[in-house]
Image: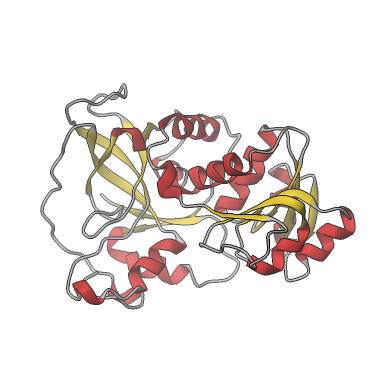
Amino acid sequence: MTRPGGPDALGELDLAAEPIGPGQVRIRVTSATVNPVDAMIRARPRQDEADAVRVPGMEVAGVITEIGPAVDRPFTIGDAVMAIVVPSGEHGGYRADLVVPARSVARIPAGLSHAQAATVPMNGLTAQLALDTLALPAGATVAVTGAAGSVGGYFVQLAKLAGLVVVADATRQDETFVRDCGADEIVPRGDDFAAEVRRRHPGGVDGLLDAAALEAAALPAVKDGGTVVTVRGYRGDGTDRVRVVPIFVRDYVEASAELDRLAALAGDGRLTVRVAGRLPAARAADAHRSLERRGVRGRFVLRFD
């Protein structure tokens, strides 16, 4: 887009190819996932660059077409890969030709389509970063809001692989999915989340991922001295009863070992990938409108072909 706005601000443009440098690879993008953060980028005013082009998109899949010098990852031309992208100006996932650090890229495992693979890097790394930030020992109890979402669902599965007891929220229609992800206990989604957690765990849980952005309303679920991880910059209620840590996935954008593991887990079916639908890239505006629809599970993926 050249100006901020609603979904109709998105349009097709011809842009110059990005230059490739040391440690980078060029990807012919086949699939780009549409995430809520993309809508925030689309709508955010930028007075300093009123007519500048901005390309959203934080996770893609495609094929490597060029490898820059000093790449320390075992890639070859033609590899099918997934990648995480940090958008900046004309650089973003919604483009057919994309250059990214090689350490932001992982091979797509056999059995996973490009559309499925495109939903793993950003959402999966966010969930892994949350788990690593909490740093809870096996056997500890962790709660998660937004467990039926992409980040929340991955977090539940990763937490179970780490040996944690998981208390997750869910609506009635999402309960089966969240339980299938491995949640040990289900509490109703909503404003009473913290009270329901405390009813089951009177002393509070050891840690919490607030993927639903309940913010202050979620804090009472956690015991004194516990940790809450937030995903939209929330830093707490001004007290020090619990430690509140906002996380930003850009801190894991070159976490290649973690991305490789996520790819392997998705390929093995231990991470559940969900594609709500595929749309041609020219229909990006329709994909963004889908973000406002209630009850949609999984992510819409833009198709470049």
* Closer to the camera in the image, 87 or 80: 87
Q: Indicate whether 215 appears above or below 249.
A: below
Image location (x, y in percent) of residue 101: 28, 37
Q: For residue 109, what is the image quadrant? A: top left
Question: In this image, 9 relative to 170: left or right?
Answer: left
Q: Position of residue 156 (x, y in %)?
A: 66, 45
Q: Is residue 196 left or right of residue 181?
A: right
Q: Position of residue 118 (x, y in %)?
A: 41, 45
Residue at image point 50% right, 72% down: 292
**Residue 138 % position (x, y):** 73, 32
Q: Which residue appears at 47% of the width and 43% of the height?
A: 120
Residue extending furthest toward the top: 74
- Left or right, residue 150 beside residue 204: left
- Residue at position x 22%, y 27% in the image: 77
Residue in the foreground of this view, choosing between 145 and 111: 145
Q: Quadrant of residue 38?
A: bottom left
Q: Is residue 72 above or below residue 230?
A: above
Asked whether 10 or 254 is in front, the reply is 254
Quarter in which the N terminus is drawn:
bottom left
The residue under the point 72% across, 41% down is 182
Query: Quarter-wise, where is residue 56 in the image?
Result: bottom left
